[in-house]
Image (spheres, grey):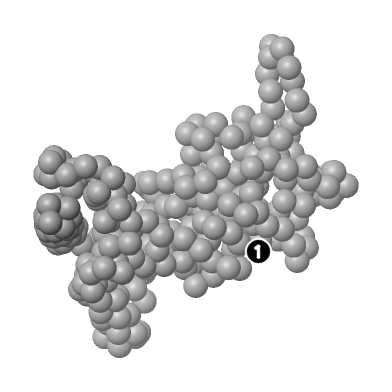
Amino acid sequence: MSGKTDRLLFKIMSQTQREKIVGKALEILEKHPNGVRYTELTRLIKEDLLDIPDNTIQSNIWNLDEKVNGISKPERGIFFLKKYLLLGKQTESSQKQTLNGAFPNDAEIFEKIKIPSEESFYQPFADYLLNDLGECTKVVSLGGNKFGDKWGTPDVFGVYKFSDTDPVRPQIEIVSVEIKTDINQLITAFGQASAYKLFSHKVYLVIPKDAEGEISRIESLCLRYGLGLILFDRNNHENPNFEIRTRAIKNEPDYFYLNLYLKRLGGRINELF
């Protein structure tokens, strides 16, 4: 009898802990319309529920979207209240209707609110690649059709050259970057970035932070194929707030094509070597 009583008390206590955890998670998500990542959500719950073991909190949080109808996980590792996701989609739809209906001929107004061009992010990312990531010692903005073929031209192109004072000096590394502001072209951008591996040691793909559910898929692809992934604010070219998700993995390019494309840089090659 005593054993049954102990099991019943443990069951009641566990249920109470689950209810506390779920209740606290809902309270936190209510205050965060832009969602909360798993690690941050776990930390915030721990701060208030000090009497509940860490393992218990984690085991009740990782699949919270399956346990609670009002919670959604549109991409890996981030939780939203469903009402905020629906509200965001309604707002986006309303904005599109306004742009397409209220001001169909007002080019001046549309110009003020449209997303900055991809070209406006080339130099900011070149600086980020050089100064923040330290992946290059020299870098240039390219874009357009500088290489002159259907395989495309990197938006940013750089080299990493070891110093003459380094005891060990490996060969120069080539780094290529594909930047995309259009969230409807992410698969195309991934394919383009993958093609750059033909003549690059490292390749980075740079996509908007507001790509929502697409980021998790693109990140998985980048991990499989060794591409680096960077997120950025496509609405602000002056402060894009670049955020690294995965580092590029070094691979050996085809040196025939590497030399071919370097020759096509013409006079700009002097900016790199």
Camera-nearest residue between 157 and 270: 157
**Which residue is labeled 1 in the image?**
191
At 62% from the left and 54% from the top, the residue drawn is 224
Q: Quadrant of residue 65?
A: bottom left
Q: Residue furthest front?
A: 1
Q: SS class of the residue under badge 1?
A: helix
Q: Quadrant of residue 136?
A: top right
At 25% from the left and 60% from the top, the residue drawn is 34
Camera-nearest residue between 37 and 104: 37
Q: Is residue 90 above or below residue 205?
A: below
Q: Position of residue 248 (x, y in %)?
A: 60, 44
Would you say residue 184 is visible in this rendering? Answer: yes
At 65% from the left and 54% from the top, the residue drawn is 225
Q: Quadrant of the N terminus?
A: bottom left
Q: Position of residue 215 (x, y in %)?
A: 46, 61
Q: Residue furthest right?
A: 256
| Residue 32 relative to residue 126: left or right | left
Q: Position of residue 194 (x, y in %)?
A: 68, 57
Q: Amino acid at mark 1?
A: Gly
Q: Quadrant of the C terminus?
A: top right
**Marker count (numbered):** 1
Q: Is residue 151 above or below residue 261?
A: below
Camera-nearest residue between 218 and 68: 68
Crowdedness near tag 1: few (<14), some (14–19) or many (≥20) residues, C-alpha within 10 Å: few
At 53% from the left and 61% from the top, the residue drawn is 218
Camera-nearest residue between 224 and 60: 60
Q: Position of residue 8 (x, y in %)?
A: 14, 58
| Residue 266 relative to residue 128: left or right | right
Would you say residue 117 is visible in this rendering? Answer: no
